[in-house]
Image (cartoon, rainbow, N blue to C red):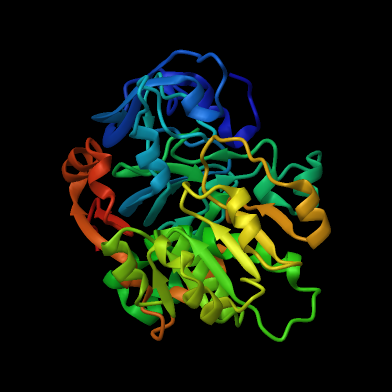
């Protein structure tokens, strides 16, 4: 494995990823993903191209000696992301269904990237105070001066970036070792919602920030156009889809329509959206005309993983924008002449770096009650480990949160 930059050096030790010393150290419980590394032909992107038989293990990991720029967080709450579930789901050949970047699963990797906890130790050069209650970016850009992408502050597309919990050890454990540059204090949420409920609710900040970034990417493509009406259609009523819908409402789009076939998710999405419909209803001309008129929605977001981008491109109005958020590993093919003639844009959104502060401010608002997006609570690593063994049982959930450790 190549060395990327200093804050990732501890990952270079493979199965001893936390260690910079061979001396015996204290251990801490965690949930790891394990898989056999078997390169696939023809090649597929991400984990689906190399990791066979992924599964979770409840184990102990040695507590790290912290390198410069790193901190140790005592984890209180974690969220289960669709990426975590896709990592564990398998296709007919037994390969992981996750098409995103992945690494070190063959040695065992601590899963999880949506978390809230308390800073309990810090490496050299770190200024954040011990005891600070934080959440974190899950995407870690290199932020190096020689990186042209980071120099332009386009951090979400840094070619050297890595994903906490999928390429480097994450937060499904009592302790998490993460870069200080990724941390965000959650004081604004604690002050508004109270300490305990604020800690639990702030787990939602990371996926909410993903939705804010995704919608912002699409809105920037149509912002120059003078429109008296702007509407949005979101395919997928899971956590990210609802987050995109909330962002659209905050930008003044109306109506905002979410298309979601799962009844449980749809009912939860209705707490936040004007219209939540079954995908079949989009085929009804009367509904379509009432919602979008003859021109169609200004923005279409694909957050379901099942709607073809070409279909979304046909739905969006002339001069509108389609944003793809869901990873599927599939190639995208659209009618280029149609896109050119009608001036439509397709964009893609990765990550959320730069959007967590806005997400935290939205979580602090009482009029939004975003903690209602949490559909189920788990308690302890044992329950989390058992639940992750059957990822298909999360189908009705919007956001599952697990309380790992209570130290307050």
In the figure, is residue 288 to the left or right of 88?
right
User: Can residue 368 be seen by looking at this rendering?
Assistant: yes
How many tags in the picture?
A: 0
Question: Which residue is more in the foreground, 365 or 210?
Answer: 210
x%, y% of residue 323? 63, 57
Residue lying furthest front in this view? 285
x%, y% of residue 235? 49, 59
Taking the spot 31% from the left edge, 78% from the top edge, the residue there is 194
- Please tell me whether residue 277 is drawn above or below residue 313 in the rendered image: below
Taking the spot 50% from the left edge, 70% from the top edge, the residue there is 245
Question: Which residue is more in the foreground, 107 or 268?
Answer: 268
In the figure, is residue 156 to the left or right of 89?
right
In the figure, is residue 316 to the left or right of 56?
right
User: Can residue 213 be seen by looking at this rendering?
Assistant: no
x%, y% of residue 322? 65, 58
**Splitting the image into 4 quarters, where does residue 147 fall?**
top right
x%, y% of residue 54? 34, 25
Question: Which residue is more in the foreground, 310 or 386?
Answer: 310
Question: Which residue is more in the foreground, 392 or 11?
Answer: 392
**Splitting the image into 4 quarters, where does residue 68 fall?**
top right
For the N terminus, give its image quadrant: top right
Taking the spot 50% from the left edge, 14% from the top edge, the residue there is 39
Taking the spot 28% from the left edge, 57% from the top edge, the residue there is 397
- Please tell me whether residue 121 is drawn above or below residue 229 in the rendered image: above
For the C terminus, give its image quadrant: bottom left
In the figure, is residue 76 to the left or right of 159?
left
């Amino acid at each position: 494995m190549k060395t990327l930059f200093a804050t990732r050096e501890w990952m270079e030790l493979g199965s001893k990823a936390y260690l910079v010393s061979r001396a015996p150290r204290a251990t801490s419980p965690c949930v790891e993903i394990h898989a056999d590394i078997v390169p696939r032909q023809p090649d597929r992107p991400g984990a689906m191209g190399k990791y066979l038989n992924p599964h979770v293990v409840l184990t102990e990991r040695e507590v790290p000696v912290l390198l410069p720029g790193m901190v140790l967080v005592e984890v209180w709450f974690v969220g289960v992301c669709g990426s975590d579930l896709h990592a564990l789901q398998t296709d007919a050949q037994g390969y992981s269904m996750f098409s995103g970047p992945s690494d070190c699963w063959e040695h065992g990797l601590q899963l999880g990237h949506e978390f809230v906890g308390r800073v309990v130790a810090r490496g050299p050069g770190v200024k954040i105070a011990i005891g600070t209650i934080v959440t974190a970016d899950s995407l870690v850009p290199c932020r190096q001066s020689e990186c042209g992408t980071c120099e332009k502050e386009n951090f979400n597309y840094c070619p050297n970036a890595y994903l906490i919990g999928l390429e480097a050890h994450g937060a499904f454990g009592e302790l998490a070792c993460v870069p200080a540059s990724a941390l965000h204090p959650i004081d604004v949420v604690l002050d508004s919602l109270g300490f305990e409920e604020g800690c639990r609710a702030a787990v939602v900040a990371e996926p909410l920030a993903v939705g804010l970034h995704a919608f912002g990417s699409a809105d920037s493509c149509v912002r120059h156009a003078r429109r008296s009406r702007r509407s949005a259609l979101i395919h997928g009523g899971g956590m990210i889809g609802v987050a995109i819908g909330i962002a659209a409402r905050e930008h003044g789009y109306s109506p905002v329509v979410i298309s979601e076939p799962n009844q449980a998710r749809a009912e939860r999405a209705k707490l936040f959206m004007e219209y939540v419909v079954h995908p079949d209803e989009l085929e009804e001309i009367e509904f379509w005309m009432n919602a979008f008129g003859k021109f169609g929605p200004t923005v279409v977001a694909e957050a379901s993983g099942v709607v073809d981008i070409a279909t979304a491109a046909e739905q969006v109005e002339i001069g509108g924008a389609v944003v793809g958020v869901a990873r599927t590993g599939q190639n995208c093919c659209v009618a280029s002449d149609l896109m050119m003639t009608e001036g439509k844009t397709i964009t893609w959104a990765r990550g959320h770096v730069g959007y967590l502060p806005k997400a935290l401010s939205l979580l602090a608002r009482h009029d939004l009650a975003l903690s209602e997006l949490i559909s189920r609570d788990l308690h302890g690593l044992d329950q989390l480990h058992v639940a992750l063994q059957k990822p298909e049982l999360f189908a009705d959930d919007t956001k599952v949160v697990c309380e790992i450790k209570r130290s307050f």
